[in-house]
Image (cartoon, rainbow, N blue to C red):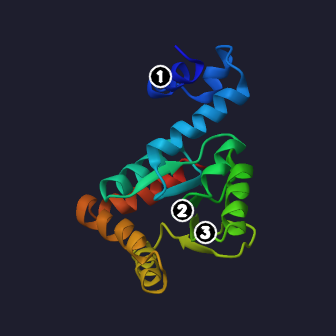
């Protein structure tokens, strides 16, 4: 069996690249095969999710988008994931007021999205400070006024070339999960990062 085939088997089994490197495989080979494997899994029309919040919450958002017909790729924990921004259809970012362990990588992902002129929407907790980037729309979320958040997102659908994606996030969540789940999601996003 070739090294590439063995690495693909390990990725299919759920191993992360860092774990595979610890098994003794060369780092450059592991990440080269991993990139190719991921590209094959997500194709070209996917949404890249950059984040600096609890992974469980990010996974829920990704799963919700998948249910609505969007392919997603959640940013990893190394700079190697920056290469996946280029083929992405768009980038969604999520950040809380309190910086987490992934904040530096989130900022690099947003910079890369801006550099590549990718349509990018960053959902941030009210009061969160991020650098200003070109082509990036910041949407402040307020736990105190979730209806205003939904109004902002719906309003953005009218102005955006990705209005269908934003509408899917909002309307799909309302129809499939209900307004209580949206409020819970917003609460989870920001309460786990305090």
Is 153 or 126 nearer to us in this picture?
153
Which of pointers 1 and 2 lies earlier in the amino acid sequence? 1
21 shown above or below 149 = above
Left or right for 24, reference 84: right
Q: Position of residue 77 (x, y in %)?
A: 65, 40
Q: Position of residue 115 (x, y in %)?
A: 72, 67
For disc 3, the marked residue is: 118
Residue 174: numbered disc: none
For disc 2, the marked residue is: 92
Of tags 1 and 2, the one toward the viewer is 1
- Residue at the far front: name it: 2
For disc 1, the marked residue is: 9
- Residue at the far left: name it: 175
Count how many numbered circles sit on residues in the image. 3
The residue lying at 72 percent from left, 26 percent from top is 27
Circle 3 — which element? loop
Q: Are marks 3 and 1 in contact (CB under 8 Å)?
A: no
> What is the crowding at mark 2: few (fewer than 14 residues within 10 Å), some, or many (at least 20)?
many
Of tags 3 and 2, the one toward the viewer is 3
Q: How far is the residue under mark 3 from the one under mark 2? A: 10 Å
Circle 1 — which element? helix
Circle 2 — which element? strand
> What is the crowding at mark 1: few (fewer than 14 residues within 10 Å), some, or many (at least 20)?
few
Left or right for 4, reference 165: right
Which corner quadrant of the image does residue 180 belong to? bottom left
The residue lying at 41 percent from left, 48 percent from top is 60
The residue lying at 72 percent from left, 30 percent from top is 28
């Amino acid at each position: 069996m070739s090294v590439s085939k063995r690495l693909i088997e390990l990725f299919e089994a759920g191993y992360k690249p860092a774990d595979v490197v610890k098994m003794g495989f060369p780092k450059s080979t592991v990440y080269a095969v991993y990139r190719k494997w991921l590209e094959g899994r997500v194709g070209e029309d996917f949404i890249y999710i950059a984040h600096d919040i609890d992974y469980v919450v990010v996974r829920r958002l990704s799963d919700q988008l998948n249910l609505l017909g969007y392919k997603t790729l959640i940013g990893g924990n190394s700079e190697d994931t920056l290469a996946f921004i280029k083929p992405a259809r768009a980038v969604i970012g999520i950040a809380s007021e309190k910086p987490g362990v992934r904040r530096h990588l989130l900022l690099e992902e947003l910079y890369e999205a801006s550099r590549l002129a990718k349509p990018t929407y960053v959902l941030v907790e009210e009061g969160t400070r991020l650098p200003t980037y070109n082509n990036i729309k910041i949407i402040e979320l307020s736990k105190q006024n979730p209806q205003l958040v939904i109004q902002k997102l719906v309003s953005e659908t009218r102005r955006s070339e990705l209005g269908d994606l934003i509408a899917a996030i909002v309307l799909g969540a309302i129809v499939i999960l209900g307004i209580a789940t949206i409020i819970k999601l917003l609460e989870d996003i920001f309460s786990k990062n305090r």
